[in-house]
């Protein structure tokens, strides 16, 4: 039973355009969500997070949107740059005392110059 | 600035061999986590330490897997009698005083069991 799903294994976007990566979850106890970026042969790098008390969090070119009723979150990258090409993982945690992150399977983003 | 470091970065083991994977967390980070990432999958939780106390080992796949953090800093993940299905990337992460803080990951150890 996969509690965090990233249904698009890959995405290609032109440089300068918007990249939208999606993530769905099933566990209503999740209250903290994160996005990590991963380059080959490196560990995941923290990108941005959002608490369930918010519906939007912005950091520079990166914005995460949370729709609790739909159990859906998305990461928007504007404008996309070639250096953004990587695998993006969404992760969730939640419930009192819950510290383990549950990860999706990742979306490979390719930004075309 | 020193992030999370892991060694070795790559390990090839013969089936049945014991291996030990090391993690050096960010200095001062109280919480330490181990995850396993199979090819094409996201990381999956293995175990969690707060200082030297192992508070959760529910993700360890079998009793061949053992983790320790004796002095509350460096941690070692040991796999005994390795099997081919143990082949994966093993990621270590740490977070500051409160486990609810963001986890920062090391580069991982890629283990291949032949």
Image (cartoon, grey):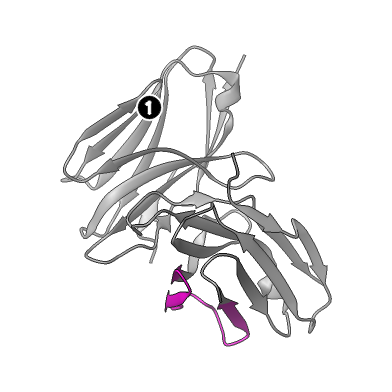
Whole-percent x and y of residue B37?
58, 60
Q: Callout 1: helix, strand or loop?
A: strand
Residue under the point 60% across and 23% down: A83
Residue under the point 80% across and 80% down: B15
State the residue in front, A27 or A33.
A33
Return the chain for callout 1.
A
Query: Outermost residue, bottom direction?
Result: B63
In this rendering, the answer to whether A41 lies above or below A74 is below
Whole-percent x and y of residue B101?
35, 51
> How many dots with numbers?
1
Question: Magenta span has A44?
Answer: no
Circle 1 residue = A76
Circle 1 packing at 10 Å, graded few (<14), some (14-19), many (20+), is: some
- Chain part drawn in magenta: B49-67
In this rendering, the answer to whether A57 lies above or below B54 is above
Quadrant of the rendered structure where residue B97 is? bottom left
Residue under the point 35% across and 62% down: A99
State the residue in front, A78 or B69.
B69
Classify residue B67 as left or right of residue B109: left
* Quadrant, the C terminus of chain A: top right
């Amino acid at each position: 039973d996969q509690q965090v799903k990233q249904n698009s294994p890959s995405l290609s976007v032109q440089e300068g355009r918007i990249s939208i990566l999606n993530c769905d979850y099933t566990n209503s106890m999740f209250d903290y969500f994160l996005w990590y970026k991963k380059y080959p042969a490196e560990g995941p790098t923290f990108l941005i997070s959002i608490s369930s008390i918010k519906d939007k969090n912005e950091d520079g070119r990166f914005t995460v949107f949370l729709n609790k009723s739909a159990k859906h979150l998305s990461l928007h990258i504007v404008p996309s740059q070639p250096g953004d090409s990587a695998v993006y993982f969404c992760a969730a945690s939640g419930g009192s005392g819950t510290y383990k992150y549950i990860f999706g399977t990742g979306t490979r983003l390719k930004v075309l110059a | 600035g020193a992030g999370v470091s892991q060694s070795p970065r790559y390990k090839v083991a013969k089936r049945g061999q014991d291996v030990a994977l090391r993690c050096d967390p960010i200095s001062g980070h109280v919480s330490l986590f181990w995850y396993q990432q199979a090819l094409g999958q996201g990381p999956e939780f293995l175990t969690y330490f707060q200082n030297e106390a192992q508070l959760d080992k529910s993700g360890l796949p079998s009793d061949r897997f053992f983790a320790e953090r004796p002095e509350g800093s460096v941690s070692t993940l040991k796999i005994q009698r390795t099997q081919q299905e143990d082949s994966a990337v093993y990621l270590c992460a740490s977070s500051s005083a409160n486990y609810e803080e963001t986890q920062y990951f090391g580069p991982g150890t890629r283990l291949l069991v032949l």
